[in-house]
Image (spheres, rainbow, N blue to C red):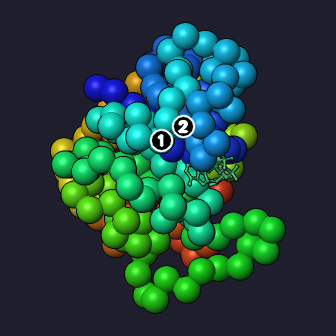
Amino acid sequence: MTIGIIGLGAIGTAFARTLARAGIEATMSNSRGPDSLKALARELGASIKAGTREEAARADIVFVAVNWTRLPAALAGLPDWNGRIVIDANNPIEPPLFKPVDLKGRVSSELVADLLPGARVVKAFNHLRAEILAGDPQADGGRRVLFYSGNDTAAKAEVAALIDRIGFVGIDLGSLAVGGKLAQFPGGPLPNQNLIKIG
Ligand SMILES: NC(=O)c1ccc[n+]([C@@H]2O[C@H](COP(=O)([O-])OP(=O)(O)OC[C@H]3O[C@@H](n4cnc5c(N)ncnc54)[C@H](OP(=O)(O)O)[C@@H]3O)[C@@H](O)[C@H]2O)c1
């Protein structure tokens, strides 16, 4: 299983750190190209390489963490998705105004999925602040909880296995329409709930 990351800001870097800590290989990319990620690659160690957006998008699981209004450009012109898994870590809001986007009654992940024809989209890694996600998932005698949701059971199982491998506890919230809404920021009840599962 290969992993690619598109967007290496706060949340993409936090995800990359969790992979690096577990020794999992990944290719990371941003809008400025691999040279701009050389220092981060050195810091993260041998398992995380800098690449192009296209290289990252060819992975079996592609983690996307890009500013909401830049998602169309970040996901344009990539190879056909052909059932590859995309983890949508995005929220429909962005600094500096933090003005909620009009989703026209849909869940933000459904709008992201529209940009990813043929991909199996799993919403995850979006409910905690980046500094908490980057930290040790073992805390207070238990493991930190991450939520995931999606419409494809097999894709969710692969994301659940990854969540487990990097030391978190995953909780399946159901479909994108149901779980995506619960975990969505703003609007859902789960964002910023920093939960630890004991035992
Ligand atoms: N920050 C958090 O605590 C947090 C928590 C949960 C969810 N989220 C969500 O995660 C997403 C990212 O947030 P962030 O805070 O990580 O943002 P950020 O720090 O501003 O980073 C955004 C990243 O997106 C990349 N990007 C922008 N346009 C691109 C393009 N056309 N192609 C490839 N990469 C592109 C940027 O690359 P360049 O710098 O090279 O342009 C940058 O690496 C947002 O949807 C946000 O709502 C954030």
What amino acid type should be assigned to the residue bearing mark 2? Ser
Q: Is residue 43 left or right of residue 144?
A: right
Q: Residue 23 at x, y = what percent?
A: 49, 14
Residue nearer the viewer, 142 or 130 = 130
Res. 66 image quadrant: bottom right
Res. 12 image quadrant: top right
Q: Residue 91 at x, y = what percent?
A: 57, 64
Residue in the image at 36% along x and 50% along y: 78
Q: Residues within 10 Å of mark 2 (few under 14, many from 20)?
A: many
Q: Circle 1 is placed at which residue position? A: 53
Residue in the image at 45% along x and 19% along y: 24
What amino acid type should be assigned to the residue bearing mark 1? Arg
Specify whether residue 195 is in view: no
Confirm or reject: label 1 Cβ below 8 Å from ligand 1: yes
Determine whether 150 is above or below 26 in the image: below
Confirm or reject: label 2 Cβ below 8 Å from ligand 1: yes
State the quadrant of the N terminus. Answer: top left
What is the tally of numbered marks visible in this picture? 2
Q: Secondary structure at mark 1?
A: helix
Res. 37 image quadrant: top right
Determine whether 76 is above or below 35 in the image: below
Disc ID at residue 29: 2
Q: Secondary structure at mark 2?
A: strand
Residue nearer the viewer, 181 or 61 = 61
